[in-house]
């Protein structure tokens, strides 16, 4: 059994001496998975024609089938994309929206998704409506009711975060999807952070489309995302880049959008092997306990609230920064902490305040979070 904490960290290429508390933003792949991706690249470059024309199509579908089985969906309904944002773009830019139609999201929606919705609404005359989610959230009703109250007969699409990027809060996707469908709206779930954090059976959630990342919590190389589309929601759905597969069906259109490095997609089965070797229930329990206990210790040290109760989180949690650390630019603070304290943590602006969103991955240990707790001693975190 692979030991968590420091022993596991040695299997990654992480910079020594730096506390990485932001696995959620970009993830990191272990050496073994990076090696698998490199073998695919070498195989491709040994004979590019043979690889692209003869070997790639079957290898790509086998990788997709392996991921589909893990996610609880059919292989023909799943395709690889670069990341969840690409999946969101494919869906939103394929919709036939009209003036007066509404897209419903929340104030916790990932900004890249929000900008895509703004772009689509600007081109179609549709309206973007955001349900306001205030922090801290007391219980699941604080995530369900604001969204439910904004649904109406003009709502054509509901865009839901499975796990909110700014905080790590887990939305009641199944209940919200059922309500949306009952009211005649279609549902797109941005599951960027869910694969690996949550046990998934995507087909049972009630969504029309679900997109997610493998490079975050499943340890795959960067550039490995996926888009699932219910069979009844595939007509008219196209990738952002149209290529030779146009008109040949969902998988054919998305599998080939032009010459590219396919190694990240092809190494997903190796990432799944790495993840499964640690036993999913074991890694989720470790990460959840580490994230929630560390967040509580930091909140106690800072004298500030958490974003919500532990049961609404998986492997991420947010703590409001004390007044001494509040800034106008969260990126400036992140850069300063990384340079001065070798501390990598996401700082998010939510509801007019800055929050530190911590991530807990199995290579982390309790001591990694002590530096963050100590930063309230001065405005910039100087000891």
Image (cartoon, rainbow, N blue to C red):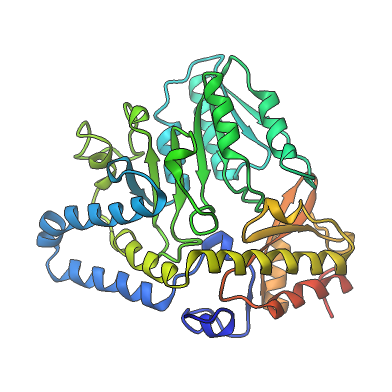
At x 50%, y 84%, the residue is: 10
Q: Viewer-proximal residue, 310 or 94?
A: 310
Residue 62, image x, y percentages: 24, 56
Tell me: 237 left or right of 48: right
Residue 372 visible in the current orientation? yes
Residue 354, image x, y percentages: 77, 54
At x 29%, y 61%, the residue is: 266
Q: Viewer-proximal residue, 137 or 354?
A: 137
Tell me: 300 left or right of 216: right
Position above or below: 312 against 96: below
Tell me: 121 left or right of 34: right
Residue 329 visible in the current orientation? no
At x 42%, y 40%, the residue is: 203
Q: Viewer-proximal residue, 88 or 336?
A: 88
At x 76%, y 44%, the residue is: 139
Residue 120, image x, y percentages: 50, 29
Position above or below: 238 against 327: above
Tell me: 235 left or right of 259: right
Residue 280, image x, y percentages: 49, 64
């Amino acid at each position: 059994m692979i030991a968590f904490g420091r022993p596991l960290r040695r299997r990654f290429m992480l910079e020594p001496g730096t506390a990485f508390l932001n696995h959620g933003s970009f993830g990191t792949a272990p050496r073994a998975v990076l090696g698998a991706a490199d073998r695919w690249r070498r195989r491709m470059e040994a004979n590019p024609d043979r690889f692209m024309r003869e070997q790639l199509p079957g290898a790509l579908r086998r990788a997709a089938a392996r991921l589909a089985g893990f996610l609880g969906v059919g292989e023909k309904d799943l395709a690889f994309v670069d990341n969840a944002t690409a999946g969101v773009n494919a869906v939103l830019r394929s919709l036939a929206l009209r003036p007066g139609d509404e897209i419903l999201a929340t104030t916790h929606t990932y900004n890249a998704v929000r900008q895509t919705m703004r772009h689509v609404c600007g081109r179609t005359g549709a309206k973007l409506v955001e349900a306001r989610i205030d922090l801290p959230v007391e219980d699941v009703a604080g995530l369900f009711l604001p969204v439910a109250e904004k649904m109406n007969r003009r709502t054509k699409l509901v865009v839901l975060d499975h796990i909110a990027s700014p905080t790590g809060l887990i939305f009641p996707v199944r209940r919200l999807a059922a309500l949306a469908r009952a009211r005649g709206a279609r549902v797109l779930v941005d599951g960027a952070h869910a694969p690996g954090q949550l046990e998934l059976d995507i087909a049972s959630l009630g969504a029309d489309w679900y997109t997610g990342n493998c490079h975050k919590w499943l340890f795959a190389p960067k550039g490995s995302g996926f888009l699932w589309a219910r069979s009844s929601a595939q007509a008219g759905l196209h990738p952002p880049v149209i290529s030779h597969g146009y008109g040949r069906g969902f998988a054919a259109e998305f599998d080939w959008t032009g010459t590219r490095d396919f190694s990240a997609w092809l190494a997903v089965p190796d990432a799944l092997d790495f993840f499964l070797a640690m036993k999913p229930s074991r890694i989720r329990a470790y990460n959840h306990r580490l994230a929630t206990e560390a967040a509580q210790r930091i909140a106690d040290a800072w004298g500030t609230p958490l974003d919500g109760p532990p049961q609404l989180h998986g492997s991420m949690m947010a703590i409001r920064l004390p007044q001494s650390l509040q800034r106008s630019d969260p990126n400036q603070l992140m850069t300063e902490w990384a340079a001065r304290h070798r501390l990598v943590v996401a700082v998010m602006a939510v509801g007019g305040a800055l929050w530190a969103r911590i991530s807990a991955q199995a290579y982390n240990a309790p001591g990694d979070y002590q530096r963050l707790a100590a930063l309230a001693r001065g405005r910039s975190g100087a000891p």
